[in-house]
Amino acid sequence: MAQTEAQLRASKKYHQKFDDLRIRVPAGEKADIDSHAQAMGESTNAFVCRAIRETIARDDATGKARPERNTK
């Protein structure tokens, strides 16, 4: 079944809220990441986002120098 024009507009509007980030991991590591995320009760995307946010917060707390970043 093809999407209606309204569905296409809604999908486009939804996806405009996000940036895409593609990462590559060594072979076999994706399964480890997926299983850890599942064990923590979250999606792989949620786990990776949390890991990034926590690492940024930890780096900020230790005063590591880094370029200006866009804070939301």
Image: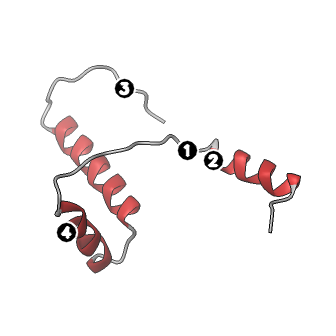
Which residue is tagged 4?
32
* Disc on the earlier residue, 2 or 4: 2
Determine the residue positioned at 38% across, 72% down. Answer: 42
Q: Are marks 2 and 4 in contact (CB under 8 Å)?
A: no
Could you say which is closer to the camera, residue 59 or residue 23? 23
Q: Are marks 1 and 2 in contact (CB under 8 Å)?
A: yes
How far, Cα to Cα, is label 2 from label 3? 22 Å
Q: Which mark is residue 18?
A: 1
- For badge 3, the amino acid type reads Arg
Could you say which is closer to the camera, residue 17 or residue 63? 17
Q: Are marks 2 and 3 in contact (CB under 8 Å)?
A: no
Q: Residues within 10 Å of mark 2 (few under 14, many from 20)?
A: few
Disc 4 or disc 3, which is closer to the eye? Answer: 4
Secondary structure under badge 2?
helix
How far, Cα to Cα, is label 2 from label 4? 28 Å
Could you say which is closer to the camera, residue 56 or residue 7? 7
- For badge 4, the amino acid type reads Asp
Q: How is the image coloured?
A: secondary structure
Which residue is tagged 2?
15
* Disc on the earlier residue, 2 or 3: 2
- For badge 1, the amino acid type reads Phe
- Dividing the picture into quarters, in which one does residue 35 lie? bottom left
- Dividing the picture into quarters, in which one does residue 23 lie? top left
Left or right of 26 in this view: 13: right
Left or right of 21 in this view: 11: right
* Disc on the earlier residue, 4 or 3: 4
Q: Are marks 1 and 3 in contact (CB under 8 Å)?
A: no
Q: Residues within 10 Å of mark 4 (few under 14, many from 20)?
A: few
Determine the residue positioned at 71% across, 46% down. Answer: 12
Secondary structure under badge 3?
loop
Which residue is tagged 3?
69
Place of residue 29 in the rendered image (x, y in percent of width and height, measured from the top left): 18, 61
